[in-house]
Amino acid sequence: MIVPDDAVAVEIEVPFHDVDALHVVWHGHYYKYFEIARTALFRDRGLDQTFYLDQGVALVVMESQCRYKVPLRFGDRGRVAAWFGELDHTMTIRFEMTNTSTGRRCATGRTRLATLDSEGKLLTSIPDAILSKIKKP
């Protein structure tokens, strides 16, 4: 997987409360790390929660996927990159997590989001106000 130039990355350090008895990160926490990177990506594009409320729309997760490569352990430092993938009637965010000490890829993933209107109805396309912010100048 090639991380594009417009990806946004965050640095994390694995805390003790994220690991099991073998000091390996519990698999579900990778989704938390992805979410932290997704939030940073959205903020970078001006797509914070206030923006969505002002537009009268909400995003909901339709599907998430994570592929584990090499486990992270307590105290490891990682870099999680997030970027926009496919944009059709839904929005896909892609992720890559790397152990910054070893340079090895730990996990890759994606999250697919749908847009709802203020009444909770599924929109058949991503609103132009959102698309214009995704396309970074």
Image (tube, grey):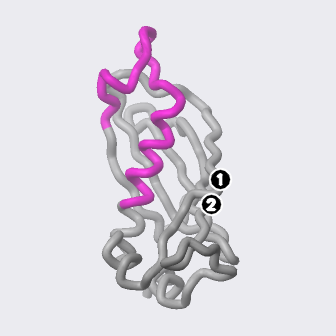
- Find out whether the residues at labels 2 and 1 contact each other: C-beta distance under 8 Å: yes
Q: Residue at x 56, y 39 (%)?
A: 107
Above or below: residue 126 compared with residue 109: below
Q: Residues within 10 Å of mark 1 (few under 14, many from 20)?
A: few
Answer yes or no: is residue 103 visible. Answer: no
Question: What amino acid is labelled 2 in the image?
Answer: Arg
Question: Which quadrant of the structure image shows residue 121?
Answer: bottom right
Q: Residue at x 54, y 62 (%)?
A: 60
Helix, strand or loop for disc 2: strand
Q: Residues within 10 Å of mark 2 (few under 14, many from 20)?
A: some
Which is nearer the eye, 69 or 101? 69
Residue 82 relative to residue 88: left or right = left
Residue 70 relative to residue 51: left or right = right
Answer yes or no: is residue 118 visible. Answer: yes
Question: Can you identify the residue that label 1 sits on?
Answer: 63
All told, the count of numbered labels is 2
> Any magenta on residue 12?
no
Q: What residue range appears in magenta?
A: 13-39
Which is nearer the eye, 58 or 112? 58
Tell me the distance, in whole angstroms, between the alpha carbons under discs 2 and 1: 5 Å
Question: What amino acid is labelled 1 in the image?
Answer: Glu
Helix, strand or loop for disc 1: strand
Q: Position of residue 45 (x, y in %)?
A: 39, 76
| Residue farthest along the top direction in this orientation | 21
Residue 43 relative to residue 34: left or right = left
Q: Earlier in the sequence, mark 2 or mark 1?
A: 1
Question: Can you identify the residue that label 2 sits on?
Answer: 112
